[in-house]
Amino acid sequence: MLGGRLYGGVRRIIRWQLVVMVVCGVIAYVAGGWKTAISASAGGLIAFVPNAFFALRFGFFDPTRSARDIVRAFYVGESMKLVLTGVLFFLAFQFRELEFLPLFSGFMVALGVYWIALLQ
């Protein structure tokens, strides 16, 4: 699958999530310092990593795939995204130094980019 081309919308979502995650980290640094910036960036990563995994695993154009294969791949990919998101949150909660409000804010902002990009 890696020989194909990523759909344009998939590339756009990944790119915007990465940009917004960096901007969110910079704003958090200015507002609260390194600890806040790391927390916000970790939240952004929790949203970005599963989406990037999904895109790199299932977001390639392949004209030989049937509709059934595409739907099955979508459901498997979304299930894997949910599991990966849960695992990443579990790992983040192991670090007591992280601030939870910036963590969830970074997550929500990066996830919001995903949903806004889907509407366009």
Image (cartoon, rainbow, N blue to C red):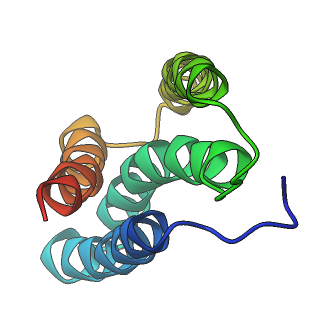
Q: Residue at x 49, y 72 (%)?
A: 11
**Relative depth, front residue between 2 and 83:** 2
Q: Position of residue 90 (x, y in %)?
A: 54, 19
Task: Choose top left, top right, bottom left or bottom right for residue 104.
Answer: top left
| In this picture, residue 117 sits left or right of residue 16 | left
**In the figure, 29 relative to 38: above or below?**
below
Q: Residue at x 60, y 19 (%)?
A: 68
| In this picture, residue 76 sits left or right of residue 20 | right
Total label count? Answer: 0
Q: Residue at x 37, y 66 (%)?
A: 13
**In the figure, 13 relative to 16: above or below?**
above
Give the position of the C terminus as an image quadrant: bottom left
| In this picture, residue 86 sits left or right of residue 27 | right
Q: Position of residue 22 (x, y in %)?
A: 38, 78
Q: Position of residue 64 (x, y in %)?
A: 76, 46
**In the figure, 14 relative to 75: above or below?**
below
**Relative depth, front residue between 42 and 48:** 48
**In the figure, 65 relative to 44: above or below?**
above
**Relative depth, front residue between 49 and 98:** 49
| In this picture, residue 61 sits left or right of residue 90 | right
Q: Residue at x 71, y 38 (%)?
A: 65
Q: Position of residue 118 (x, y in %)?
A: 22, 54
**Relative depth, front residue between 42 and 20:** 20
Task: Choose top left, top right, bottom left or bottom right for residue 2.
Answer: bottom right
